Image (spheres, coloured by chain):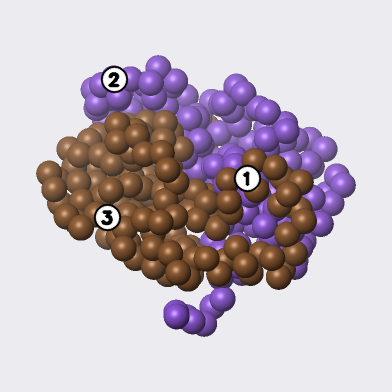
Chain colours: A purple, B brown
Amino acid sequence: MRARDLAEPFPVVTLDTDAMQAARLLGSKRLPGLIVCGRDGRPYTVLPGSQVLRFIIPNYVQEDLALARVYDEQSSDELLAKLTTSTVRDVLPGERDVDELPIVDHDATTIEVAAVMARTHCPIVAVVDGDDLLGAITVGRLLDHLLPSSPAKP
Amino acid sequence: MRARDLAEPFPVVTLDTDAMQAARLLGSKRLPGLIVCGRDGRPYTVLPGSQVLRFIIPNYVQEDLALARVYDEQSSDELLAKLTTSTVRDVLPGERDVDELPIVDHDATTIEVAAVMARTHCPIVAVVDGDDLLGAITVGRLLDHLLPSSPAKP
C-alpha cells in the first residue's frame, strides 16, 4: 500500500484565497488543516488547523496568555476584521522550511506517511506525483488503514 | 462567550486504556486528538492526532525518513503488534510540560482558547472546572463560532 492508494480528494486554497474564506472552510467542513497551493497548482505549504488560528491571533497574544484573557467580544471582533481584507499569503506564518513540509511522493510507504505526520505535527499530508497534487491523507484515514478494523484484542 | 459555553462532550481514554484501542478510537471516529485522563478523572495530557502516531512509529524512524521508507507491510505489522500489548501509559511521548498543556479553565475567553491551541499546536483543548472535565473544544468548533456564518464578503 502506497500513499497514492490512500490519498483522497481534499479541498485546497491558494495563496490568493481570501483569508476569512480559508479559515471558514476549515471551520465549516471541520477539516484537520489546509493545503495551500501556489499559482502552479503545487502545494506551497500545508497547515494544521491549530496553525490556521495564527491567521487570527497575533504572535504577541500567543506568547502572553494574560493578554489573550483581556480580549472581550468586541476586541476579538477587531482581530477577525483584519481577515476580511487579507489573503492567505498575507497571514501565513513567516517561517516555511521546505524540507519539513508534510508533502510526500505518491510512492511513499504508509510508515513513511506516518513518520512525516508525527515529525511535522501535521494531521494531513499532501500526496504529489511530480507537479501534480493527487490528494491528501488524514491521520484518521491512515490509522483506519494501519489498524485492523476487526477488534482483535488479545 | 466563555470556554464552558463552547465545550462539547468528547471521548476520553485513560492511562490504562489499551494503546491499540485508543489509536483505533482516533481513526474510527476521526477525532482530532485524544484526551488522556488519569485515575482522578482529570486530564493528564491532550495529544494531537499527529502525535498519537508516535505510539506506533519509533523515534529513530521519525528522525530518519530513509528508514521509514524501508518498512514494508510485514515489518509495519510488527510495529503495530506492540500496540496490542501496551497501555496508553506505555506509549506516551516522554516529555510532558504541565504548563504547556492544551487545558483551559471553563472561564477562558474564546481568544484565550485560540491562543492556547495555536501555541500548543493542538486542535483540541480540554475545558476543566476545578477537578472536573467539562468537555472539549475543537479548532473546527472554535472557528465556526469566531467567524460569522453568513458569508459577508466585502
Residue A3 image position (x, y, % from top left): 74, 59
Residue at the spot 41% in from the left edge and 35% down from the top edge? B120
Mark 1 or 3: the one toward you: 1
Disc on res. B37: 3
Q: Is residue B59 left or right of residue A1?
A: left
* Residue B45 falls left or right of residue B77: left
Decide which of A141, A28 is in the foreground and name it: A141
Q: Is residue A49 above or below residue B133?
A: above
Look at discs 3 and 2 and give the one toward the viewer. 3
Can residue B104 be seen here? The reply is yes
In this rendering, the answer to whether B92 lies above or below A76 is below
Q: Earlier in the sequence, mark 1 or mark 3?
A: 3
Q: Is residue A129 left or right of residue A20?
A: right
- Residue annotated with mark 1: B60
Specify the label residue B142 is tagged with.
none
Real-space Cα separation, disc 3 to disc 2, in angstroms: 29 Å
Give the residue at the far top of this rendering.
A60
Considering depth in this image, is B30 or A9 the residue closer to the camera? B30
Q: Residue furthest left?
A: B130
The foreground one among B100 and B153 is B100
Q: Nearer the viewer, residue A46 or B62?
A: B62
Mark 2 burial class by Cα count in 10 Å: few <14, some 14-19, many 20+: some
The answer to whether residue B2 of the structure is visible from this angle is no
- The reply to whether the C-beta atoms of the residues labelled 1 and 3 are less than 8 Å apart is no
| Residue B82 in the image: above or below residue B132 | below
The residue drawn where x is 12% and y is 44% is B130
**Residue at (15, 51) in percent of width and height:** B132
Give coordinates of residue B34: x percent, y percent. 39, 55
Q: Quadrant of the N terminus of chain B?
A: top left
Residue where numbered disc 2 is placed = A67
Report the amino acid beneath label 2: Leu
- Kindly identify the amino acid type of the residue bearing the numbered disc 1: Tyr
